[in-house]
Image (spheres, rainbow, N blue to C red):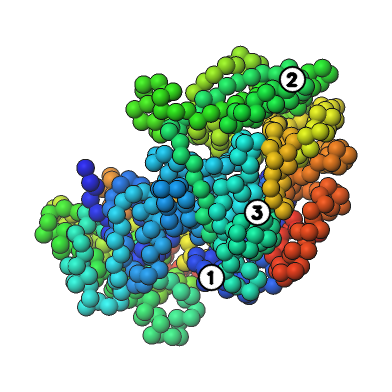
Amino acid sequence: MTKPAVLILGARSDIARAVAHKFAALGHPLQLAARNVDRLKADKTDIELRYDVPVTLHACDALAIKTHADFVATLPELPQIAICAIGLMGRQSDHEHDIVAATRIMRSNYEGPASLLSHLANQFEKRGNGTLVGISSVAGERGRASNYIYGSAKAGFTAFLSGLRNRLARRGVHVVTVLPGFVATQMTDGLDLPARLTAQPNEVADAILRAVKRKQDVIYVRRVWRLIMGLIRLIPERMFKGMKI
Amino acid sequence: MKISGWGRYPVLEVQTHKPRDMDAVRDCVLSQPTLIARGNGRAYGDSAINPSATLDMRRLNRMLAFDPQNGQLVAEAGVLLGDIISAFLSRGWFLWVTPGTKFVTLGGAIAADVHGKNHHKDGSFRSSVDWIDLMGPDGVVRRCSRHSDPSLFDHTLGGMGLTGIILRAAIQLRPVESGWIRQTTIPTPNLKATIAAFETARDASYSVAWIDCLASGDKIGRSILKLGEHATRRALPAAQALSPFSIPRKRRLSVPVDLPGLTLNAYTLRAFNALYYKTGTRTSGEHLVDWDSYFYPLDAIHGWNRIYGRNGLAQFQCVLPLARSEAGLGALLSEIAKVGSGSFLAVLKRFGQQQSAFSFPMEGYTLALDFPVNPKTLALLERLDKIVLDHEGRFYLAKDSRMSAATLHASDPRVAAFMAHRNRHGLAQRFLSAQSERLSL
């Protein structure tokens, strides 16, 4: 029996690569989407060789909102599971005074992903089943001076996923929100992250597969993050604004 | 960040880079004054550490092509040997040569020119390598093989990453009919008998002995010799013959914390070694063993290197020429038994002939030992070095973390030619590791 197809948006990211390998190992055909498809060719060959599943590549620019309907319509088949790993962090200090660059971060982390998932959601709803996975961030749980541009976009995306889940819950479509905490990826290369709080891309991928299978709603990859973010949210704003975290 | 080899000694503060494509590798090569590539960190000492720039190659881990007609696989250097097995064993292909852990990268296997239990028949990892793509100090990628640029090919195999950054390679896989090994266990009471048993077993595909390095007197060198053959489909019991490549799922053990240094003392080691020997004599004869347990018994214990405590462990592996093997092994084992701070498991293996410019193996016997790092064992290792030199043997750089440059240069006349190659091609100033600096390579 052939397994249903899995679409991965932002397929060049480390988390996306790890997720792709896990689904391919289970025998799912993959649709990998990224802005620059040429750079995915080696991944396609790699995954096909390792797991003997078909992989198709699809150009998709998260910021080219008008192309998104077409992108979804021209997929070889409507996937059963779609995972959005699109994200862009950059350095906050570069964006505080370069507002155009800042809006690019906001659009890449919220507008683009939300637009793509909206198109997919509508198709899934029509079909009456499917799973959407959005990789958001704990940075969206509370705005902090060091990372609020990225964080605010992720906050929007988290709220979007929550609303989408609510809307589609009785329509057979499940929505998973992933809040990974620190992950050792190219996005965080060069940052000095505490090892106990930092997950490997493989761990995130395992957590995503589990969440899809068990229809979990919101997952933190390392459980300690649920506690940390719970505490951070509890700090009164009067104190929070003076803190450096 | 602080990193070390698998022996967790020495630990050095290092600037690491994690390139994700060829462009990023080139950027590092062109911008860093000195650097070294690193695979999965399974070399025991400081081979893959350069404090100013260490390139973690594990993101370059794609398989690029496979030809089912001739079994040739092309893959990036960061692919793990275990990934190759996962991908291809179920289709009837296995590695021609594998070391005792599957958690090494393809690039690392080439750089150390690793060997396995079949060296006496099939040679080192080199035998399975068709070509290597290497980035030189100028950022240019060169493909070398036995026919094109053979000198670069020769020096890269066993060259410990000191000839450039290994990017990709083509290797041959071997066809197998199952994932099972027919293992024959032969206990031998002393060194003479062990060597005789190895010589008798020259036709076995695989052979390796676990040697009781704490036995003394007339028991010195007593061993459990294990021979192996790939099981044909027909040789399997009905249950396994149905799906000859699937093996039972294993419980994975792990050592989550450093054990206190006292855990491995003369008494526990002696007891363990004696028990191991006893168990071996009791289970002698032929058994069917799955590939994972046969080739990679220690991989089942995650973080086994922690049993040596927080100071880490020092590996010691030497090879002695055939004519001097018995005398040399006798001298090494007596010295170890005398100190009583032996190795948890010591491994003895017969090597066959070896072709290469700087690879470790040569025809003769190789002995591998590990010791907790402390002043007593470091002093013992110095004495073992001397015994090896007296018997015209040499040392495995992938295991070394503490040898002196003088010892290396005295042991291996090929060092001069290797250094000349490095100087001639402008490699000596660029590709450096803590080990190459220590050993003046």
Q: Is residue A105 left or right of residue B257?
A: left
Label 2 sits on a secondary structure element that is helix
Q: Quadrant of residue B25?
A: bottom right
The disc placed on residue B176 is none
Seen as rendered, the residue at the extreme front is B147
Q: Which residue is mark 1?
A: B24
Amino acid beneath label 2? Ala
Residue at the location (53% across, 28% down)? B229
Q: Depth check: B106 or B373 in front?
A: B106
Per the model, the C-alpha gap separating discs 3 and 2 is 34 Å
- Mark identifier at residue B193: 2
Of callouts 3 and 2, which one flags the residue occurring earlier in the amino acid sequence?
3
Q: From the viewer's perspective, is B438 left or right of B83? A: right
Residues at discs 3 and 2 in contact (Cβ within 8 Å): no
Q: Which chain does tag 2 point to? A: B
Residue occupying the point 69% across, 33% down:
B349
In the image, residue B179 sits, relative to residue B426, either above or below, namely: above
User: Residue A242: x and y, percent?
Assistant: 50, 72
Q: Nearer the viewer, mark 1 or mark 2?
A: 2
Give the residue number, with chain letter if any, for mark 3.
B157
**Mark 1 or 2, nearer chain start:** 1
Q: Amino acid at mark 1?
A: Ala
Q: Residues within 10 Å of mark 2 (few under 14, many from 20)?
A: some
Q: Position of residue B152 (x, y in %)?
A: 66, 61
Q: CA distance from mark 1 to mark 3?
A: 24 Å
The answer to whether A170 appears left or right of A63 in the picture is left
Chain name for mark 1: B
Q: Amino acid at mark 3?
A: Leu
Is the Cβ of the residue at disc 1 closer than 8 Å to that at disc 3?
no
- What element does badge 1 sit on? helix
Vertically, is B135 above or below B93? below
